[in-house]
Each structure stands twice: as C-alpha cells, then as structure tokens.
Image (cartoon, grey):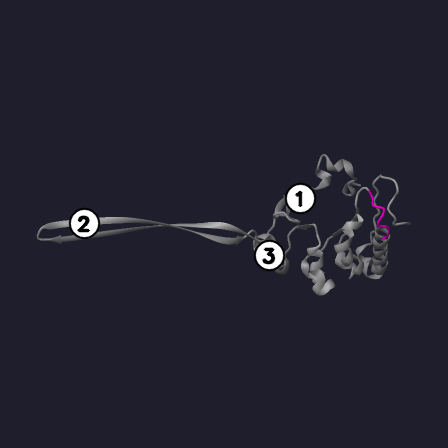
C-alpha cells in the first residue's frame, strides 16, 4: 500500500476504518498511517495533484494528540493538502491539545457548526459570530389633563406630547442558547473573510444530483 498521490488524473479514495471497540487497542497503528500519509504527500513540494488531497478525520480526538496534524493545519494548504477534522465539541480539542487547541480554529478556511449541547462550545461560537449594529427606536406619548372651576364657570384643558428617541446599539448575531437549539436540518458556516452563514444540511443520498456520485451504504 502506498500513500503517494496517483500520477493519473482520476479521483481515488483510500479509507481507513477501525471499529469503535478497537480504537483503544489499535489507535497507534491508525495514528502511524495518518502521519505517514501526510508526510508522503507533503514531501515532494514540486509535484501537486490537480485537486487537493483531502484528509477526512472523523472523531479526530479519538486518535489522541497528533503533532503532525496540528502542524499540518497551518502549513499544508501550500502543499495541495486539505484537512477536515470532525469533533464533538471544543472541550474535546482542549483536552487533547491543551492551550494550543485554537490553532485548528485559527488556521481553518471554513468551519461548520452543527449544534452542541454544551455551553462552552455554544459560547465560543457565539463569540465567533461577532456582533452587528442595530438601531433602537422608542416612542413615548404623554397626555396631561387639567380642569378648573370658579365664580366665572368651569374650564378644562388637555395636552399631548410625543417624544421619539433613537440610539445605535450592538447585538450578538447569534446567542449561545439559540445555537444550542439549532435545528437539526441547519448548520452554521464560518468561511474566512465572510460573514457567518446559516445553511441547510443536505443528505447527499437524497439529492437527485449528488446521489449519482456515490453509493448509499444505508441501503446495501
């Protein structure tokens, strides 16, 4: 088996899968293969594939700390390599990578957030979304009534005063509690140098165009 990029232009996929009950026993083997694959593809900088080599690391924290992957997030874009790490929440990354866990966030060209039930992750993505400027408008109406009576008769008067005020304020684009309740069919997408995007999750095997590009393993 070789991890060297193919010379031909056709697309190919190499999948490494371990059953969940074997991760603890064989995670070192899997870590070795991943690090070797990254090293081989980054070694020859003069040869770049027509399309970037994508490393999809599902349940990445289960592999433990991978120094090669940590470094690759900041360097490998120039080598024609893309890394797509999938984690359950920010706490997982912090537990494995310590204070350097935000390296993955800072060096990512795109981040997808599918919702989480922990407050730490929700607060973090609330901050990533930033704030927007809004106008606060308020209107007040005051009415005054008066009356008097005397030897000359009775009189009454009234007055109405309208007051309108406006002020500029800032509000969060998203709040943590909203993110924790994010609909299962939606996702938050953060792309470098663009405003946050609320997108829809598409099941490729239910899409007329996308389902022709793959095989749905759910139906055998």
- Decide: few, some or many residues near mark 1? Use Cα within 10 Å; few <14, some 14-19, many ≥20: few
Q: Can see residue 213?
A: yes
Report which residue position mark 1 lands on: 201
Q: Nearer the viewer, residue 142 or 7?
A: 7
* Mark number displayed over residue 45: none
> CB under 8 Å between callouts 1 and 2?
no
> CB under 8 Å between callouts 3 and 2?
no
User: What residue range appears in magenta?
Assistant: 43-49
Q: Residue furthest left?
A: 151
The residue at the point 23 percent across, 51 percent down is: 145
Report which residue position mark 2 lands on: 156
What distance separates the C-alpha of mark 1 from that of mark 2?
67 Å
Element carrying mark 3: helix
Q: In the picture provided, is 113 more to the left or to the right than 149?
A: right
Residue 92 place in picture, x, y as percent: 71, 60
| In the depicted structure, whether residue 74 falls above or below residue 218 | below
Report which residue position mark 3 lands on: 127
């Amino acid at each position: 088996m070789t991890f060297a990029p193919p010379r031909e232009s056709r697309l190919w996929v190499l999948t490494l899968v371990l059953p969940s009950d074997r991760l603890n026993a064989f995670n070192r083997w899997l870590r070795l293969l991943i690090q070797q694959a990254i090293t081989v593809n980054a070694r020859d900088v003069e040869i770049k594939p027509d399309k970037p080599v994508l490393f999809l690391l599902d349940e990445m924290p289960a592999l433990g700390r991978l120094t090669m992957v940590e470094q690759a997030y900041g360097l490998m874009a120039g080598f024609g390599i893309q890394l797509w790490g999938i984690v359950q929440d920010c706490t997982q990354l912090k537990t494995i990578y310590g204070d350097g866990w935000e390296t993955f966030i800072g060096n990512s060209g795109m981040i997808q957030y599918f919702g989480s039930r922990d407050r730490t992750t929700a607060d973090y993505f609330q901050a990533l979304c930033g704030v927007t400027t809004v106008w606060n408008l308020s209107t007040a109406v005051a009415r005054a009534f008066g009356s008097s009576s005397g030897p000359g008769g009775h009189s009454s008067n009234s007055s109405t005063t309208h007051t309108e005020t406006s002020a500029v304020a800032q509000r969060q684009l998203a709040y943590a509690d909203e993110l924790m309740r994010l609909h299962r069919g939606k996702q938050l997408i953060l792309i470098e140098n663009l405003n946050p995007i609320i997108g829809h999750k598409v099941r490729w095997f239910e899409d007329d165009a996308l389902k022709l590009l793959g095989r749905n393993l759910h139906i055998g």
